[in-house]
């Protein structure tokens, strides 16, 4: 379920994109809203269509390199249940815990955005309505701290409780995913997330 949180007092809307540091952003936004991180539904908006109509609010979201994002999703949702005993949530798509990355990519490539899980849905799809972006500002995961500061200064948001170390990325390493990609998989991701490449300017650099 896509999280879209609103502050009517400060007049902003944050549209979350999963696997783009969304949990640390949710923590900061809910702190600003004065609610618990798990109480986000109190301040949620029911649909992206509603966000599209809120043109007098400042609407923002963040995006990430599609190849890195998909590998992060694989590590978290496919490998994580095997290594850490997490719940496996992707059985409905025919995926299996611990399946090969190549098979996961091929599977995702066959699932349209309308049927995709939030963790691998297209980012343009998540931030748009009727193929029009509904956010006024798009920050980037690759420039997270600086881009968050842009939003933070405008609305006096808390800083991110962010450490540049997670289960899928070593500190300062934005190419952690590349050894796992073959030319075939690079092209599959490029085709599946063509809208992200077109609208957000991402390219796979060798």
Image (cartoon, rainbow, N blue to C red):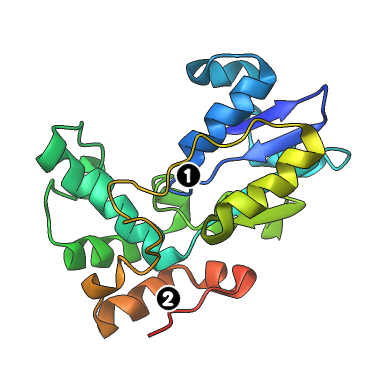
Whether residue 141 sits left or right of residue 96 in the image: it is right
Tell how many labels.
2
Q: Compared to 9, does 133 lie above or below?
A: below
- Disc 1: CA contacts within 10 A as few (<14), some (14-19) or many (>=20): some
Q: Position of residue 182 (x, y in %)?
A: 24, 80
Q: Compared to 25, does 145 lie above or below?
A: below
Using the rendered image of the protein, determine whether residue 127 is visible from the camera's viewpoint: no
Among the two numbered marks 2 and 1 on one chain, the one whose residue lies closer to the N terminus: 1
The residue at 71%/28% (across/down) is 6
Q: Position of residue 103 (x, y in %)?
A: 18, 64
- Marker disc for residue 108: none
Judged from the image, the secondary structure of the residue bearing numbered disc 2 is helix
Whether residue 164 sits left or right of residue 194 in the image: it is left
Q: Position of residue 119 (x, y in %)?
A: 40, 47
The residue at 42%/69% (across/down) is 192
Whether residue 94 sits left or right of residue 61 in the image: it is left
Q: Determine which quarter of the picture holds residue 151.
A: top right
Q: Which residue is mark 2?
A: 190
Using the rendered image of the protein, determine whether residue 81 is visible from the camera's viewpoint: yes
Real-space Cα separation, disc 2 to disc 1, in angstroms: 22 Å
Q: Determine which quarter of the picture holds residue 204.
A: bottom left
Position of the C terminus, as image quadrant, is bottom left
- Disc 2: CA contacts within 10 A as few (<14), some (14-19) or many (>=20): many
The residue at 60%/23% (across/down) is 30
The residue at 31%/65% (across/down) is 176
Q: Position of residue 40 (x, y in %)?
A: 56, 21
- Marker disc for residue 21: 1
Judged from the image, the secondary structure of the residue bearing numbered disc 1 is loop
């Amino acid at each position: 379920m896509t999280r879209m949180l609103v502050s009517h007092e400060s007049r902003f809307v944050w549209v979350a994109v999963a696997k783009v540091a969304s949990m640390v952003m949710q923590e900061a936004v809910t702190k600003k809203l004065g609610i618990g991180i798990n109480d986000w539904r109190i301040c949620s908006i029911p649909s992206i269509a509603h966000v599209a109509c809120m043109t007098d609010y400042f609407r923002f979201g963040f995006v990430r390199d599609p190849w890195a994002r998909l590998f992060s999703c694989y590590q978290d949702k496919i490998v994580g249940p095997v290594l850490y005993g997490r719940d496996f949530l992707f059985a409905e798509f025919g995926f299996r815990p611990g399946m090969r990355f190549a098979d996961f990519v091929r599977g995702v490539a066959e699932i349209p955005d309308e049927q995709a899980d939030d963790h691998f849905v297209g980012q343009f799809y998540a931030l748009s309505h009727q193929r029009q972006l509904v956010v006024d500002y798009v920050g980037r995961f690759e420039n997270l701290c600086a881009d968050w500061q842009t939003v933070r200064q405008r609305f006096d948001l808390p800083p991110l409780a962010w450490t540049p170390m997670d289960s899928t990325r070593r500190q300062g390493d934005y190419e952690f995913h590349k050894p796992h990609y073959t030319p075939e998989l690079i092209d599959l991701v490029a085709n599946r997330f063509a809208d992200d490449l077109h609208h957000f300017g991402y390219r796979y650099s060798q």
